[in-house]
C-alpha cells in the first residue's frame, strides 16, 4: 500500500534558523515527488517539484531513494514561511497521457517566530 | 486571474438534503479531481475525471457522485449528506503527473 509519513505535526523555529520538514514514503514504482503548501486563508499550491529541481522561496528537497525520503529544507527560515506543508508523492500519469494520483501526508504546520 | 474557481465558498445544507458543489477551470486541463479534507486531516481523493472518463476511488461512498458536462466544469453531488460529510471540498486540475492546481475550496456544513 502507498504510504506517506510526515512525522512532525508541528514544527516551530525562530526566524533565521534552518528548518527541515521530514517526509518518508512507501510506494510501488517510481512516484513523482511534490511538496505543496497552504498559507493561512489561501488555497493549496505547489511549493516544489522534484523533477524540476527548482529552489522555490529558498526551499530545496533532496530525494533519497535508498531511504525513500524527500525532506524539505531551508537554511534561513522567514516569518512568511509559516504555513501547512504537505509532502505528496504522485503515482501514475507517466508521459502526461493519463492522470496522476497525489497521496498527501498528514502535513506539518511550520511556525516561524520573530 | 483565478484558474480554478469553486462555488459556493460556503455551503450549509440539512441532513439528508441533496447538495451540489461546482468547480470551473480556465487551464484547459484534461483531468479534474475532487478531494475531501476534514478538519486537521490531509486532503483525500474522492474521484477524478480524465476527459469524460469517471474514475472513482475504491473507498469513496456511493453517496458521492460527480458530473463533468464539458472540459471547464465539474460538479460534486452529495445525494444524502450526513453529519460526517461536513468538510472542505477541494477541486483540482492537472495533466498526467504535472502540478495540480487547486481551487479555494467549498466548506460544507451539515445541520
Image (tube, coloured by chain):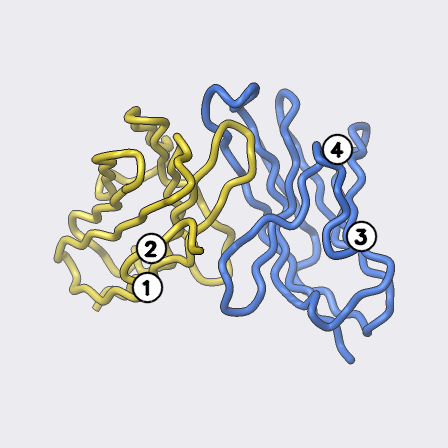
- Is residue B107 placed above or below A65 in the rendered structure? below
Asked if residue A62 is positioned above or below residue B12 in the image, the reply reads: above
**Residue at x 23%, y 67% (from the top left corner):** B12
Q: Is residue B86 left or right of residue A34?
A: left
Q: Which mark is residue A68?
A: 4
Q: Are the residues at dot 2 and dot 1 in contact (C-beta closer than 8 Å)?
A: yes
Q: What's the distance in space between the residues labelled 4 and 3, CA to CA?
A: 16 Å
Chain B is which colour? yellow
Q: Quadrant of residue B83?
A: bottom left
| Chain under disc 4 | A
| Residues at marks 2 and 4 touching, judged by CB atoms closer than 8 Å | no
Q: Residues within 10 Å of mark 4 (few under 14, many from 20)?
A: some
Circle 1 SS class: loop
Q: Nearer the viewer, residue A78 or A6?
A: A78
Residue A1 appears in the rendering: no
Taking the image as shown, residue B35 lies to the left or right of residue A68, namely left
Residues tagged 2 and 3 counted as in contact (Cβ below 8 A): no
Q: Does residue B100 appear in this view? A: yes
Amino acid at each position: 500500500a502507498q504510504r506517506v509519513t510526515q512525522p512532525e505535526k508541528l514544527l516551530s523555529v525562530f526566524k533565521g534558523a534552518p528548518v527541515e520538514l521530514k517526509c518518508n514514503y512507501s510506494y510501488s514504482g517510481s512516484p513523482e515527488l511534490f511538496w505543496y503548501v497552504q498559507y493561512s486563508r489561501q488555497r493549496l499550491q505547489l511549493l516544489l517539484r522534484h523533477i524540476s529541481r527548482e529552489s522555490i522561496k529558498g526551499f530545496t528537497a533532496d530525494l533519497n531513494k535508498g531511504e525513500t525520503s524527500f525532506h524539505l529544507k531551508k537554511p534561513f527560515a522567514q516569518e512568511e514561511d509559516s504555513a501547512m506543508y504537505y509532502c505528496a508523492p504522485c503515482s501514475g500519469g507517466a508521459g502526461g497521457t493519463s492522470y496522476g494520483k497525489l497521496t498527501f501526508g498528514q502535513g506539518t504546520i511550520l511556525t516561524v517566530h520573530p | 486571474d483565478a484558474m480554478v474557481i469553486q462555488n459556493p465558498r460556503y455551503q450549509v445544507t440539512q441532513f439528508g438534503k441533496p447538495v451540489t458543489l461546482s468547480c470551473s477551470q480556465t487551464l484547459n486541463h484534461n483531468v479534474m479531481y475532487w478531494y475531501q479534507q476534514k478538519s486537521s486531516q490531509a486532503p483525500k481523493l474522492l474521484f477524478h475525471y480524465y476527459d469524460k472518463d469517471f474514475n472513482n476511488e475504491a473507498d469513496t461512498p456511493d453517496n458521492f457522485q460527480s458530473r463533468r458536462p464539458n472540459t471547464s466544469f465539474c460538479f460534486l453531488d452529495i445525494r444524502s449528506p450526513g453529519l460526517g460529510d461536513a468538510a472542505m471540498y477541494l477541486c483540482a486540475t492537472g495533466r498526467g503527473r504535472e502540478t495540480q492546481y487547486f481551487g479555494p475550496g467549498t466548506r460544507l456544513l451539515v445541520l
